[in-house]
Amino acid sequence: MATSLGSNTYNRQNWEDADFPILCQTCLGENPYIRMTKEKYGKECKICARPFTVFRWCPGTRMRFKKTEVCQTCSKMKNVCQTCLLDLEFGLPIQVRDTGLSVKDEVPKSDVNKEYYTQNMEREIANSDGTRPVGQLGKAPSSSDMLLKLARTTPYYKRNRPHICSFWVKGECKRGEECPYRHEKPTDPDDPLADQNIKDRYYGINDPVADKLLKRASTMPRLDPPDDKSISTLYIGGLGDTVTDGDLKSHFYQFGEIRTITIVQRQQCAFIQFATRQSAEMAAEKSFNKLIINGRRLTVKWGRSQAARGKEGVKEGVSEMGTRLDPVPGLPGALPPPPALDEEAPANYFNLDPSSSPAVMNIALPPPPGINPPPPGFGPPMFHPMSHMAPPMPPPMSMRPPGQIHYPSQDPQRMGAHAAHGARQGE
């Protein structure tokens, strides 16, 4: 094994001999039972160039073998994984974490200064309890709003996939499905993410992944409070089965007095109503896009007023909790609208032919069977429609001018009405 001048070949006390690596959950893999090979002083650390114990393992089925790249001292100084060099707490590159915590990198890059700095850090690590980072990172605040928004809460096992088969790209791979590499089209070589350097990642400079995350942080959405000042309720989504009422209360009580907490288990959401609007605004500002409870990232939104919620529920067929209501089978459908009535057309209540004349419409009909006809002289007078002696027939109700009222006693065709009219004229 070749060693550099900075590896302190004549003093092996500085060489690292560890029993287990410092890894993140993604690099360790999803399989709880894995086999690791341990090679004592197998390689040089890619940062401090000192020999260290190299661990090698396969994180899962159809994954590539991984190994440690830096020593544990360099890993503890930056609080990063020995393999991927991402932060152990947030899962972010060092450049993003230092920007969020306003930490300035002080690790020297020359050989002599680097060796001296590493020895001092080892002494400080030995005197600490191992629960907090050392150096400038240990003096920085525990978290920031930007880091909580960008933090990865679940392992990203897709990062452990094999590399792309170069023979398959050239069309010369003959192993088929037995090939341990991926048979996929490579990405654009001009993509900045295709050019990554482990030293740039560790020192936090010129990291394309960090630049991409910082640009995303600058364009992240904000949660603006609603105009209705009476709304003091927050909607919390994505609870799952692990987040309970007590977990929500223990987190949100710090922002102010909580009036009610309503959990809708079917929709895996909750509604938290605060006593004041100021407390709700503070809780929304401190929790939007950065609320993590029991390892789950929760969604925080503003609630809606009762009036708007009722109108929207009636309009869209959803309940107040946001669930869509299914139609009830067996109910009659909506009635068709009535036909439009023409005001100028006469009202024909008896479905009579409008082309027939009034004289023909007033022809007396024979009595129904079983009823004797009236004696002669007592029935309505029968006139021929073409006779000139017949009195003028009254117009139908639909053809009379408005304002004229017709009473049955004024009908000259009724019995006794004609005689009474003549007697009045004789007087």
Image (tube, rainbow, N blue to C red):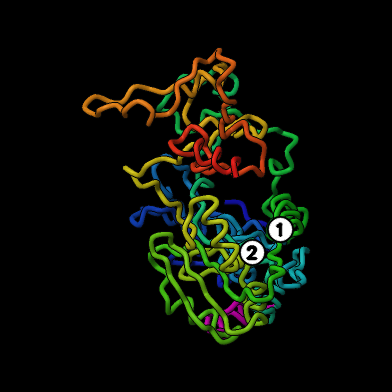
- Secondary structure of the residue carrying tag 2 is helix
Count neighbours of disc 1 (C-alpha within 10 A) and say few if under 14, some if 14 to 19, many if 20 or more. Answer: few
Magenta-colored span? 122-135
Q: Nearer the viewer, mark 2 or mark 1?
A: 1
CB atoms of marks 2 and 1 within 8 Å: yes
Q: Which residue is mark 2?
A: 149
Disc 2 crowd rating (10 Å Cα; few below 14, some 14-19, many 20+) is some
Query: Relative to the observer, which residue lies in front, 136 or 427?
Result: 427
Whether residue 193 is visible here, answered yes or no, is yes
Magenta span includes 92: no
Asked if residue 355 is positioned above or below residue 95 in the image, the reply reads: above
Q: In the rendered structure, which amino acid carries the disc numbered 2?
A: Lys
Does 368 sit left or right of 70 as displayed? left
**Disc 1: which residue:** 220
Q: Position of residue 130 (x, y in %)?
A: 53, 79
Going 35% across and 44% down the picture, which residue do you hit? 331
Q: Secondary structure at mark 1?
A: loop
Q: Residue at x 52, y 59 (%)?
A: 41
Is 194 situated above or below 297? above
State the residue at coordinates (38%, 28%): 377
Closer to the chain start, of discs 2 and 1, is: 2
Q: Residue furthest top?
A: 386
Which residue in the rendered view is the most extreme toward the left? 370
